[in-house]
Amino acid sequence: MRFKHTVHVLIDNFRVTYKLLVYILVVLIITAGVSAAIIIPFLDRLSGVAAYEGLTGAFSEMFREILRGNLTNLSGYFEAIRTSFTDLMAYLGEHPTDLALSAAGLALTMLVSDFFIGLGNYAACCVVNDKMAMHANSPFIATLIKNLGKAALYSVIYVPISFVYTSVCLVVLYLVLFVALNGVWLLIQLFLFVVFMMLLVGLKMTFISDWLPAIICGKKSVTEGFRYSFTLKSGRPVSTFSFYASSCVLILSVNVLACVSTFGAGLIITVPMSFLYLICYQLVNYCDNNDIKYFTDKRSIVKPEREKETSREQFLRGE
């Protein structure tokens, strides 16, 4: 039922996708410009390095053969890529300064980009919550400006935590799957990497699922919402984890399909819709667990089995 309600809420709020799209595009264009200013000089310094030339050559040949429909020699290209990548890492280990500076610049750029995307997600969650609570069409930019203080504090806390968690997961999976299991076939390593990464992302989303709804719908402070979400007081953590793990598969599949079948054009819709889909589930899950009624569309209201009575003070505060 929660999945069905999530889909209905997503459809009812689909116009928010376009507003979130414009916002994300602005952030990504600025991020791409700054990243290019860091990456291009770094790659220019690698020109002439045998390992780098071998890596780019192997990728070029592999994609050329894939476009021709020749898939018989993919294992050979994978092995060439693995060897060239290992040699390139060894070269960069001997020349760490350029790599360290470029990596630090890119990491800082990504953190700032994620901070601004977090602001957009907060505003989108507020807009969807207003639609679910009162079926009101709140303006995106005005909502973002109105909630900028809380949104900034939320993003400042969330982004570093998410960055550290993701970095640790990537490093651990790389060491386990690509270093410890070095003799295993590369396709199996990539398969296991994607599977475990989706499970770990699903685990992270399970613990932070109630954070935004607790702040926006539950009127808690940012830190109170964080503590509430991590205590899993709403219950049903297994069901929530199952949803997020399967959603990671669904979102990855939809975005890869959109990228391949439309040469990347479909990502313009599927990426912001993926963010909105998760936001809708978070609000639906929070409302169902806390016996809060909400609109799924203009004519449909989901009511809890036992509706809580609202005191005069809570009504005046808008709770």
Image (spheres, rainbow, N blue to C red):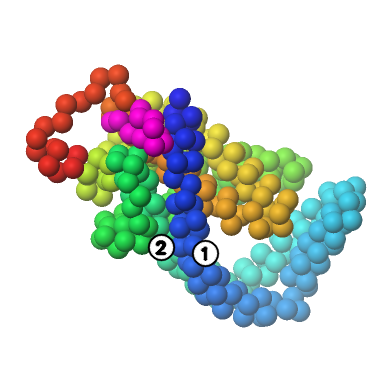
At a point 67% along the width and 80% down the height, the residue shown is 44
Question: Looking at this rendering, what residue extends furthest in the top direction?
Answer: 305
Instruction: Name the mark on residue 116.
Output: 2
Q: Is residue 69 left or right of residue 46?
A: right
- SS for callout 1: helix
Spot occupied by residue 197 in the image (x, y as percentages of width and height)? 56, 43
Q: Give the crowd class for mark 2: few <14, some 14-19, many >=20 residues within 10 Å.
A: many
Question: Looking at this rendering, what residue extends furthest in the front direction?
Answer: 299
Q: Give the crowd class for mark 1: few <14, some 14-19, many >=20 residues within 10 Å.
A: some
Between 2 and 155, the residue placed more toward the observer is: 2
Q: Is residue 111 above or below residue 304?
A: below
At a point 76% along the width and 79% down the height, the residue shown is 48
- SS for callout 2: helix
Q: Quadrant of the C terminus?
A: top left
Instruction: Name the mark on residue 41.
Output: none
Residue 37 visible in the snapshot: yes
**Magenta-colored span:** 292-302
> Is-magenta flag for residue 299?
yes
Spot occupied by residue 118 in the image (x, y as percentages of width and height)? 40, 56
Quadrant in which residue 265 is drawn: bottom right
Please tell me how many numbered marks the rendered image carries: 2
- Inspect the image, locate mark 2, and give the three-letter code of the amino acid beneath it: Phe
At a point 16% along the width and 26% down the height, the residue shown is 309
Residue picked out by circle 1: 25
- Inspect the image, locate mark 1, and give the three-letter code of the amino acid beneath it: Leu
